[in-house]
Amino acid sequence: MFIFRYIIVFIAAATILLLTGCAYATDPMASGEYSSSDFTRAGKCQQCHAIVHSQWDGTMHSNAYTDPFYQKEFHAASTDTDGLVDEFCSRCHIPIGVLSGEIPPADGSHLSEIAHMGVQCDFCHTVSGSSGIGDASFIVTPGNTKWGPFDDSKSASHASEYLELHTRSEFCGMCHQVTHPVNGLVIDDTYSTWNESYYGQNDVTCQHCHMSPGVTEFKANPGRSASNSPKREHVSLHSTVGGNAFVTGMLGAEKERKLAIERLQKAATLRLDVPRTAIKGEEVTIEIAITNSGAGHMLPTGVSEIRQMWLEVEVTDNQGQMIYRTTKADTSLSTGPSVMYNTVLGDSEGNATLSFWLAEKVIADNRIAPRETVSEQHTFTLHDNTSYPLTVDATLNYMSAPQELIDHLFGEGIHEVPVIAMVKASGKIHDPEKPVDTQAQAPGFTASMALMVLAALTITLTIIGSYKKQ
Ligand code: HEC
Ligand code: HEC
Ligand code: HEC
Ligand code: HEC
Ligand code: HEC
């Protein structure tokens, strides 16, 4: 009877694989296959890989289990599902804990010190293969061999072996692609949206942007990966940050907090289209285009039902009077609520939920695809007492989580979620009655005229010079 059920599950899984045409993981490694003492502490690796260690220490990988926000959500999920997800969540957030059978229990009472360190050195470098994409599809062989990107590396401490997987997005895709274990809903599609994009098609990998100084492209980082090791053209950075300036800030990881803000500020560009002039009493329409110019996946990605990204638009007149405003919260200050760029998940009753373990469908997906441009139009009326010129300010904002969720989990006023301004743009609208001073309107104009005169002068002098030589 039991075997029969397994066969049905197997056939179903095989059919899904055939239908999707992708090698998505079906059979993760068994829990308790190893002991945590089979793995080496990060502190040991630090003895020779001090720089790598300092980059990794403080990242969300090093905090993947201790992350207080994860802890709250994990316990909520465990309670909501009667412990059904305990092992599932832990596979990615505390992989050594699962491989060693120390978690579950969900309360963490059986955890060794080493497992606590989340996604760590001797987990990633004992990955010797994978069974596909997503849902913790890693194959791990703990021991003396460390797998990595070099085919010629030698160390007195351990054996080294080259594994192409470490240089590919498929390595990251083992965890950065999450499917609901019961109903198959895709909860995190970072790998698949990367794979379908320009970046996936052109082999711009996760490592290029997240493990090199380039942030939005590959840039070599010459140096040594261990003390006394040969100098190499590129050693990868282990400061794998995303946009999380909230939890890194909460944990006092100042370097990672700053890197996350810097990354967010390189992810998108804005283009503002405002009329040069507008008449009082009439409607004015402005257009703002947002381009996902820097992220190799959806913007935002990951737990995108929890992340928030929105455009704040403000129009003020010369006296500082607010003419028009959209903000995230539909408050008395705003003329209307902003459009939210994220995903909305629905539970079995069809109600929106942030608890993705209870989700059964995607109600809305309003994220911006890699290299995609979306635009917003805003229309407002100029009243008679408006004073020219008007200033239009647009800011693209990001929040790691809604403040209400954090208040609900931690208590009101305990943690403030920072609002990160990713990119800003502004423009002016002038009085149609008064022709504006062209120089004041375009400050670049005088400079470019001067440059043109200078260029003409240089050409003339060169011609005169060459005549003189003859
Ligand atoms: C006694 C010093 C020492 C210790 C301790 C040490 N390593 Fe290494 N490791 C080296 C040296 C030297 C290299 C060679 C670097 C090179 O070739 O550029 C190296 C290379 C590596 C590589 C590259 C392998 C490849 O083929 O791409 C990885 C991955 C690695 N170490 C991981 C670790 C991990 C994980 C730990 C802790 C469990 C650790 N190392 C502990 C000295 C050490
Ligand atoms: C999330 C998984 C992950 C973690 C955690 C991790 N590494 Fe790596 N590491 C990688 C990948 C992937 C590469 C290869 C990147 C590339 O060049 O494509 C790499 C490369 C290396 C290399 C080769 C040299 C270089 O920097 O390119 C060394 C040495 C190394 N890691 C050591 C460590 C040590 C020591 C730690 C802990 C302090 C650590 N790694 C933590 C994934 C990880
Ligand atoms: C063992 C599973 C695992 C692997 C493999 C892995 N990650 Fe992660 N990664 C995680 C988890 C879990 C988190 C979230 C931790 C948290 O926020 O509590 C995370 C967080 C991150 C973040 C920070 C996100 C933010 O919001 O700031 C980035 C960036 C990231 N990973 C990139 C990578 C890259 C690039 C690779 C491949 C080189 C990789 N990861 C491989 C599990 C993994
Ligand atoms: C072209 C550069 C680029 C590539 C390729 C890329 N990323 Fe990113 N990634 C970014 C930028 C920029 C951000 C910050 C904006 C954001 O949060 O989405 C980011 C953010 C993230 C975040 C945090 C998302 C959030 O808002 O919580 C994760 C996780 C992540 N990347 C993982 C990956 C993984 C895994 C891959 C490969 C499958 C990858 N990235 C490929 C540039 C890139
Ligand atoms: C297949 C791997 C995987 C599984 C399984 C998984 N996660 Fe994650 N989780 C990730 C990755 C990767 C990220 C980082 C994405 C990002 O930053 O947006 C993440 C991020 C999170 C975050 C955001 C943390 C922060 O600081 O912003 C929470 C909360 C979270 N996971 C909770 C859970 C819970 C609860 C479960 C089980 C119901 C779970 N995860 C299962 C891989 C996984």
Image (cartoon, rainbow, N blue to C red):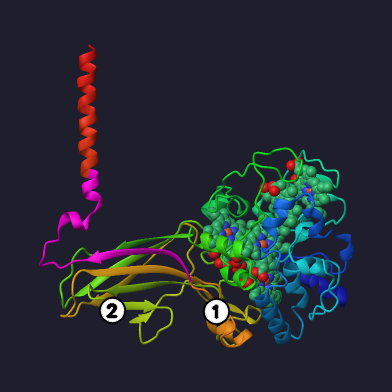
Quarter of the rendering containing residue 411:
bottom right
Residue at the image position 22 percent from the left and 39 percent from the top: 452
Depth check: 241 or 151 in front? 241
| Front-lying residue, 69 or 301 | 69
Q: Residue at x 28, y 64 (%)?
A: 427
Residue 181 seen in this snapshot = yes
Q: Position of residue 381 (x, y in %)?
A: 22, 78
Tell me if I can see residue 174 in this picture: no
Instruction: Provide the residue span drawn in magenta.
Output: 420-448
Q: Position of residue 338 (x, y in %)?
A: 40, 77
Please give left or right for residue 189 compared with residue 444 in the image.
Answer: right
The total number of labels drawn is 2
Please state the quadrant of the image where ligand 3 appears: bottom right
> Quadrant of the rendered structure where residue 180 is?
bottom right
Q: Quadrant of residue 337?
A: bottom left
Rendered location of residue 26, percent (x, y):
75, 65
Q: Quadrant of the N terminus?
A: bottom right
Identity of the amino acid at label 2?
Met
- Residue under label 2, please give it: 322
Q: Residue at x 48, y 58 (%)?
A: 266
Mark 1 = which residue?
A: 416
The quadrant of the rendering that contains the C terminus is top left
Mark 2: few, some, or many residues within 10 Å (few <14, many ≥20)?
Answer: some
Q: Which mark is residue 53?
A: none
Secondary element at image label 1:
loop
